[in-house]
């Protein structure tokens, strides 16, 4: 749904998200992107570098001025969460008050990041404001496979949108995700479970390391193929999905271990999601998408690419970092040892029960961390 050619988009916070969304701006405005999108950031030192990469005007520190000059139809807030209250109080609140007084149309607000909830905007700007929170999948196309179409993304509407504006929000989200409309609480649970599925790649790498140290060659991509094929069978999904995978891509013995681990890891995360009260259809919908996309990412990537992807996602103190540190603390060494015990026929069967429990515990830990961040 391309917006009217006289509509403008103001992007407050031209960081990773603000630049990541460029294809979305093109979808919303077509060939008007260069003239109808305006990006603002706090740090003027980064403007020149961004301007060289972005097709639209980038500036610094002039949010209030641009609001009054451009009367945007959509305001995208993609600053770090801790800055958003200041943006609301110092920039948006005065503008919305003036817009009501002078009869200007109020823009839709698209806010990115796990916090704050849309309710903060309503509490400060008024119940007539239309605000929706986006949590995109953040997966990328790899080897021509559009992973972003598989990974779950979430929309949290602060108040009901008119049908056409709701469709516009979904169309933007669908460019970067398989979209689910959820509540604020469900979005935090969904985000936590997604970051735990990132560890599908970690599991594949540790299995490869343990085998290598026994003198057994196993490719990470083949491990991920078996892991993913087993998940699809376990979850009742038909076919191979967007890219081939097979339970026979590894020798039978280690393949059996990988298949059992995949099912246990999937079940542990799902059990935690369901324990929060999320309906099963919704839980399976977004969990299947996330488990699939991050198993497939491991299947398509080199180890160096996987490490780089993790580093880009894991902002300091965030939920992804919490997933990674929790996995490293509680599962990395036990998994390594379990692989070698399995190959030596000494592994206790209860390991797979423990793996399911660790996945459950990880999701609970990360979800609680998400709430702590939300309440700061």
Image: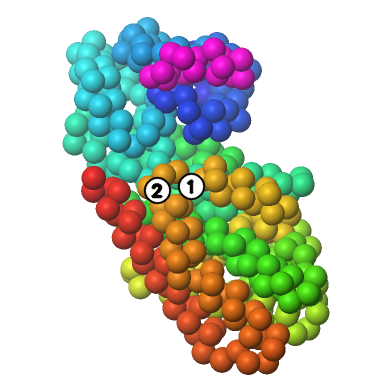
Residue 296 in the magenta stretch? The answer is no
Q: Report which residue position mark 2 lands on.
A: 318
| Structural crowding at the residue carrying mark 2, measured as other residues with C-alpha within 10 Å and reported as few (<14), some (14–19) or many (≥20) | some
Residue 117 is at least partly visible in this image: yes
Q: Is residue 370 above or below residue 2?
A: below
Q: Residue at x 37, y 7 (%)?
A: 69
* Circle 1/circle 2 CB separation < 8 Å: yes
| Of residues 368 and 22, the one drawn nearer to the viewer in this rendering | 368
Question: What whole-number distance in Å separates the C-alpha atoms at marks 1 and 2?
Answer: 7 Å
Q: Is residue 283 above or below residue 91?
A: below
Q: Is residue 200 left or right of residue 187?
A: right
Residue 368 image point, x, y percent = 31, 60
Q: Report which residue position mark 1 lands on.
A: 314
Q: Quadrant of the N terminus?
A: top right
Circle 2: element type: loop
Residue 242 image point, x, y percent = 73, 57
| Of residues 299 and 171, the one drawn nearer to the viewer in this rendering | 299
Q: Residue at x 54, y 39 (%)?
A: 171
The residues colored magenta run 38-56
């Amino acid at each position: 749904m391309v917006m009217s050619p006289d509509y403008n988009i103001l992007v407050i916070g031209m960081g990773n998200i603000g630049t990541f969304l460029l294809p979305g701006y093109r979808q919303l405005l077509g060939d008007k992107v260069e003239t109808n999108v305006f990006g603002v950031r706090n740090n003027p030192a980064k403007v020149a570098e961004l301007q060289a990469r972005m097709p639209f005007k980038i500036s610094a520190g002039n949010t209030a001025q641009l609001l009054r000059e451009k009367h945007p139809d959509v305001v995208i807030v993609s600053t770090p969460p801790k800055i958003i209250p200041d943006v609301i109080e110092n920039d948006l609140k005065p503008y919305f008050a003036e817009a009501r007084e002078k009869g200007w149309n109020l823009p839709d607000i698209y806010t990115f990041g796990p916090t704050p909830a849309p309710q903060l905007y309503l509490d400060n700007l008024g119940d007539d404001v239309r605000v929706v929170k986006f949590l995109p999948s953040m997966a990328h196309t790899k080897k021509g496979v559009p992973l972003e179409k598989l990974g779950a993304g979430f929309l949290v509407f602060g108040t009901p949108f008119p049908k056409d504006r709701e469709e516009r929000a979904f169309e933007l989200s669908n460019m970067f995700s398989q979209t689910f409309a959820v509540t604020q609480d469900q979005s935090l649970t969904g985000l936590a479970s997604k970051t735990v599925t990132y560890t599908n790649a970690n599991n594949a790498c540790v299995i490869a390391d343990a085998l290598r140290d026994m003198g057994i060659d196993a490719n990470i991509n083949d491990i991920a193929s078996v892991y993913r094929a087993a998940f699809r069978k376990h979850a009742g999904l038909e076919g191979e999905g967007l890219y081939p995978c097979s339970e026979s891509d590894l020798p039978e013995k280690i393949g059996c271990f990988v298949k059992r681990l995949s099912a246990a890891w999937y079940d542990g995360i799902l059990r935690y999601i369901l324990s929060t009260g999320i309906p099963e259809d919704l839980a399976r919908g977004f969990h299947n998408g996330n488990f699939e996309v991050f198993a497939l990412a491991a299947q398509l990537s080199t180890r160096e690419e996987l490490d780089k992807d993790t580093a880009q996602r894991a902002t300091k103190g965030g939920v992804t970092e919490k997933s990674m540190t929790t996995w490293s603390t509680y599962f990395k060494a036990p998994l390594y040892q379990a692989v070698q015990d399995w190959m030596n026929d000494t592994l206790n069967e209860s390991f797979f029960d423990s793996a399911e429990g660790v996945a459950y515990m990880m999701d609970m830990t990360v979800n609680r961390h998400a709430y702590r961040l939300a309440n700061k």
